[in-house]
Image: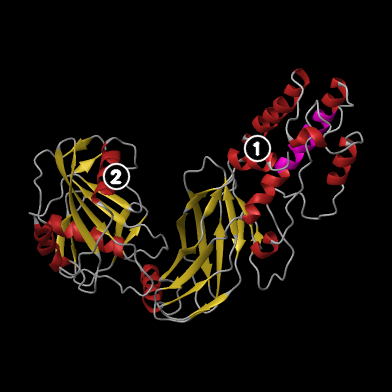
Amino acid sequence: MNHISEGPSEAELQRLAQSVYEGVSNDEGYLIETKTTLDFRRADHKAKIARTLLAFANRTDQDPRPSVLLLGIDRGRVERDRAEVDPSVAGNALRPFLSPLGLRWHFTNLTADGCVVHAITVDAPQWGDPIFTLGKECTVSTGNGSTKTYVRGTVFVRDGSNTVQATPEHIALLTERAIASDRYFRDVAVRVESGSVHTIAPERYIPELVEEERGRLLAFVDEPFVPTGPLAKLGKPEWRTPAQYTVEVQEYISALEQHLAEWAGWRPSQFAPIELAVCNLGEDNRSDVVLEARFPDDCLVIIDPERALTRQRPALPHAPSPFGWAGLNARPYDAQAALSRVLLTNDPYRAVPERVLFAGAWQCLPRLVNPGNTVRFPSCNLRPRHAVTQEAIIVAAPSDATRVDVEWSLTATNCSGTPTGSLALPLTPGVTIGDLRSVIHERT
């Protein structure tokens, strides 16, 4: 039974059958066909089942999804007297009609509305697959009451939602598929080599922390700070009025609010980078392989981690001395001057935009391309059964993200086709309210 392959899980097929029965899914289409009355007892029924399976196997598209034939079910109805069939019985019934060249299919017993439903899944075709032909002459009934005989070697294909006999044009496409195994880009994968995506949403924390800091400082107006111990000897008499102190606090809070946002933008650049690897699972060399990874639009992507890691941490303004004690500074606290010193910093990377794009040598660094958060990595050569780790990048996601999926595609210069896929990235908690609170308190 080596012609029967592993297909979608039984749970996935069960959901498909239920959606067909409830009318949620289209009854028939290019990848799905439903037959209410066909079974494995009549020869013409077995021939019709085999004809559909052969047509599914002779697809020439690049859709990676399998094809499914559902027996005993249609929209809103099921065949009530259908019994379960052992997969080996189904294999023995269909084997004479199927091509012996390795058609990959899988048989499953399902249920819908308490009745048995049969699902036969055919794997998505691959470049290099042969043309699958009818293995035995058969006669089937047609819709108008007549019969039609198909000779051994007949080729069937899908035409929309119908199974039809192949035309010369179909044969030409299938022939190209059969001889194109060396030229078509396949048997590749993308995996996470190291690192993770960090979650961050400082904007939701900043207002709360700013109000917390404002309340802490203004509380000294009603209850002035009274130094004790060694501080009592170092302090100076309070020279400020409550109104002057309140102005200092407001100016400090304005600066703090702006620079906390800047600090939170700086913080992702300190996260550990994530590395993706491109894997060649086949036996052919692949030249100039380019990986493009499309990250969700709400992610922050930093494509030059080494440059980002050397960035100077943004400065935060110093809080005014608590009212009631002038601290070590005998002169009035000049909050405006302190604010100006911070704002006029000459750091070109002070403001981190929504999407970070550092200058660099584009031939050796990843770069952002349209649309949105698509990262194009430098090209590499892949030997057979070999993997190449791509340049590291930093990715931060909103704090409420439960998963981050990256859509990837690959191209190569010595073969045709563009393999695509989706990869779930691991998540690590990033900036929290505790991070922002600690960075305030270390300056006060």
Along the line of sight, the residue nearer the viewer: 37 or 390: 390
Q: Is 254 on the left or on the right of 397, as rendered?
A: right
Quarter occupied by the N terminus: bottom left
Q: Is residue 212 above or below residue 158?
A: above
Q: Residues within 10 Å of mark 1 (few under 14, many from 20)?
A: few
Q: Nearer the viewer, mark 1 or mark 2?
A: 1
Q: Which residue is mark 1?
A: 203
**Residue at horizontal 72%, vertical 61%?**
358
Q: Which residue is mark 2?
A: 16
x and y percent of residue 78 in the render? 18, 38
Quarter occupied by the C terminus: top right
Q: Locate residue 371: give its quadrant.
A: bottom right
Q: Is residue 123 above or below residue 316?
A: below
Kindly report the distance in space between the C-alpha atoms of the residues bearing marks 1 and 2. 42 Å
Examine the structure image and report whether residue 256 is included in the region drawn in magenta: yes
**Residue at horizontal 69%, vertical 50%?**
266
x and y percent of residue 188 in the render? 43, 70
Amino acid marked by disc 2: Leu
Q: Is 383 on the left or on the right of 77, as rendered?
A: right
Examine the structure image and report whether residue 50 is included in the region drawn in magenta: no
**Residue at horizontal 16%, vertical 60%?**
47
Q: Which residues are magenta?
A: 248-261
Amino acid marked by disc 1: Glu
x and y percent of residue 8 in the render? 28, 55
